[in-house]
Image (spheres, rainbow, N blue to C red):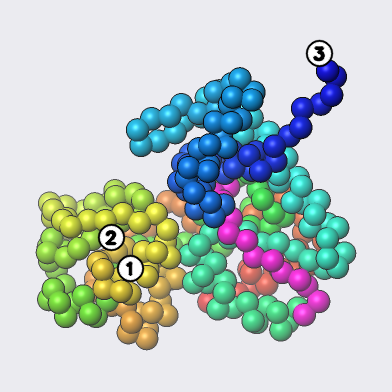
């Protein structure tokens, strides 16, 4: 048998890491801008080449096997180390930093403020990445991230940033078509938009004193920005995430018909790798985010 090392299929490993992290071939395909078939074929090829099973495939889901879970953890950690090393050496040494954020925080909070950061810190080359859901230091893709969770990220330094609240939002055009939303019971006659967890709507209805309202004509969208766009297009009523929707409500493009707010147990936190703030540009970015949160 040859002692030559097996060549690592890096593209397929990146595909497997995304599928393992998201537990969805389709979501991995969307992230990587390829087809679901490509994701499936690359993972099957890995399984054939290595003679192991990485996933248990079910009708509507995929589940990692024990060996798949172990391999995914190792690959995620390795990719994170590569990203960190690249950040340290690529571009202007000591003056570039990557920030990972979720879709709605990035689009609704960060982007409107980016010009202010660039003006105040012209020598810092900032790269903003769409970050995956972070569970620990092993899945941290950058040195700095903003993520939503319960405050527990093993191995990372964390600092609370802000709480959010859910409250129904609707477009004026939908109100013109379906009538007013005077009470929560009126929601039974409107198309409803869910974001992943349908339990949030039921919890809001309970909090609003209308637990028996039967929602109909429902659709689920898994991306928070897609939810906002669907509401703006008059496609349904959704639970808006506040304070991120304040500007749309203030300008009248979206209506918030009820005052009742559902406060989730999780909140937004600033995450950094240990000792990352010792780097001047990372310290500057973190302090800027914290000051902007306090001032918003």
Of label 1 and label 2, which has the lower sequence position?
Answer: 2
Mark 1 → mark 3, Cα distance in angstroms: 58 Å
Q: Residues within 10 Å of mark 1 (few under 14, many from 20)?
A: some
The answer to whether residue 136 is seen in the rendering is no
Look at mark 3 in the image and give the residue it sits on.
Answer: 1
Residue at the (18%, 77%) spot, across then down = 175
Quarter of the rendering containing residue 116: bottom right
Residue at the (50%, 37%) spot, across then down = 40
Horizontally, residue 180 falls left or right of residue 92, namely: left
Look at mark 2 in the image and give the residue it sits on.
Answer: 193
Look at mark 1 in the image and give the residue it sits on.
Answer: 230
Residue 199 in the magenta stretch? The answer is: no
Horizontally, residue 99 falls left or right of residue 91, namely: left
Tell me, yes or no, whether the two marked residues, 1 and 2, touch with CB atoms within 8 Å: yes
Tag 1 secondary structure: helix
Horizontally, residue 44 falls left or right of residue 192, namely: right
Residue at the (37%, 86%) spot, across then down = 251
- Residue range corresponding to the magenta coloring: 122-137
The answer to whether residue 222 is seen in the rendering is yes
Quarter of the rendering containing residue 271: bottom right
Tag 3 secondary structure: loop
Nearer the observer, 141 or 279? 141
Residue 131 in the magenta stretch? The answer is: yes
């Amino acid at each position: 048998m040859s002692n030559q090392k097996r060549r690592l299929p890096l593209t397929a490993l990146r595909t497997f890491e995304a599928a393992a992290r998201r537990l969805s071939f389709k979501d991995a395909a969307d992230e990587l801008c390829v087809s679901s078939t490509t994701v499936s074929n690359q993972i099957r090829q890995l399984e054939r080449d290595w003679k192991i099973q990485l996933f248990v495939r079910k009708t509507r889901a995929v589940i990692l096997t024990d060996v798949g879970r172990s391999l995914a953890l190792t690959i995620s950690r390795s990719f994170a180390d590569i990203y960190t090393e690249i950040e340290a050496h690529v571009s202007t040494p000591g003056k570039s930093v990557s920030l990972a954020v979720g879709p709605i925080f990035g689009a609704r909070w960060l982007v409107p403020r980016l010009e202010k950061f660039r003006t105040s810190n012209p020598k810092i080359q900032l790269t903003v990445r769409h970050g995956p859901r972070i569970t620990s230091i092993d899945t941290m893709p950058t040195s700095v991230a903003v993520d939503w969770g319960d405050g527990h990220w093993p191995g990372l330094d964390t600092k609370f940033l802000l709480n959010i609240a859910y409250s129904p939002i609707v477009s004026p055009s939908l109100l013109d078509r379906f009538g007013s939303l005077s009470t929560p019971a009126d929601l039974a006659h409107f198309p409803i938009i869910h974001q992943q967890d349908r339990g949030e709507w039921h919890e809001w209805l309970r909090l609003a004193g209308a637990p028996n309202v039967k929602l109909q004509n429902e659709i689920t969208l898994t991306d928070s920005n897609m939810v906002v766009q669907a509401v703006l297009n008059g496609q349904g009523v959704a639970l808006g995430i506040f304070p991120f929707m304040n500007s749309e409500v203030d300008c009248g493009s979206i209506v918030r018909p009820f005052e009742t707010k559902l406060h989730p147990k999780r909140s937004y936190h600033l995450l950094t790798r240990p000792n990352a703030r010792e780097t001047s540009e990372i310290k500057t970015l973190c302090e800027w985010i914290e000051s902007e949160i306090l001032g918003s």
